[in-house]
Amino acid sequence: AAGVIQSPRHLIKEKRETATLKCYPIPRHDTVYWYQQGPGQDPQFLISFYEKMQSDKGSIPDRFSAQQFSDYHSELNMSSLELGDSALYFCASSPRLAGEADNEQFFGPGTRLTVL
Amino acid sequence: AQKVTQAQTEISVVEKEDVTLDCVYETRDTTYYLFWYKQPPSGELVFLIRRNSFDEQNEISGRYSWNFQKSTSSFNFTITASQVVDSAVYFCALSEDQAGTALIFGKGTTLSVSS
């Protein structure tokens, strides 16, 4: 079965650089979520989108922005990177259709971002 | 506010022992969902179970079982006859009954199973 695809899987950046993470949800899933997991931490919700509109917002820094495109893929843009942004970034997707599992989020493999 | 507490930070057992991971949650919602995820050393989050607040039936899946008790706001996870491959971080999570909303994770319990 198709899963959530995230790219790149690993990314190394310098401080103050920018980074773009991409997420391709499971086919027919129209809701996308982003989570950040620091070393030894639990995943923290950043933001979610449904039908290209922001659905919920968590602790996403102002330096970060995200959007969902017409093909439902999503991109997380991170600017002025800081050492503390080094983390595993997960994307998840879920369907929002009648009869489907409610809010069951399927996670991608994650993008490991290292800021030097 | 929603909150998930996993009081056990680390647990170490020997193979074939049974182990229970505790999860206590707080929410004001009457309808909500509870989850368990496994995160092995490779880093991916593996979905284990989802339970809605109206379904208090315990569930068993192979060596895994879950005990949901609304009266104590707990959703505990038991691994029977643990194996080395069970070594991982286990997260309990909570969400509202609305698609598009966040999963609130507990801090996780690191389970180490030695041979």
Image (tube, coloured by chain):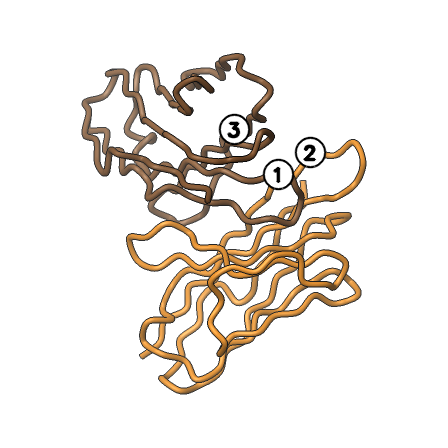
* Residue B51 location, quadrant: top right
Apparent colour of chain B: brown
Q: Residue at x 60, y 48 (%)?
A: B101
B5 or B65: which is nearer to us?
B5
Q: Chain of mark 3?
A: B
- Crowd band around label 3 with a 10 angstrom C-alpha radius: few (<14), some (14–19), many (20+): some
Left or right side of B22 for B12: left
Q: Is residue B57 above or below residue B11?
A: above
Q: Residue at x 62, y 38 (%)?
A: A104
Q: Chain of mark 1?
A: A
Apparent colour of chain A: orange
Calculate the distance from the C-alpha at mark 1 to the C-alpha at mark 3. Answer: 10 Å
Q: In the image, residue A88 lies at what x, y percent?
A: 41, 60
Residue located beneath label 2 in the image? A101
Contact? badges 3 and 2 (CB < 8 Å)? no
Q: Is residue A75 above or below residue A92?
A: below
Q: Residue at x 62, y 69 (%)?
A: A75
Residue located beneath label 3 in the image? B49
Q: In the image, residue A35 lies at what x, y percent?
A: 49, 57
Residue located beneath label 1 in the image? A104
Q: Amino acid at mark 3?
A: Ile
Q: Residue at x 64, y 40 (%)?
A: A103
Secondary structure type for disc 1: loop
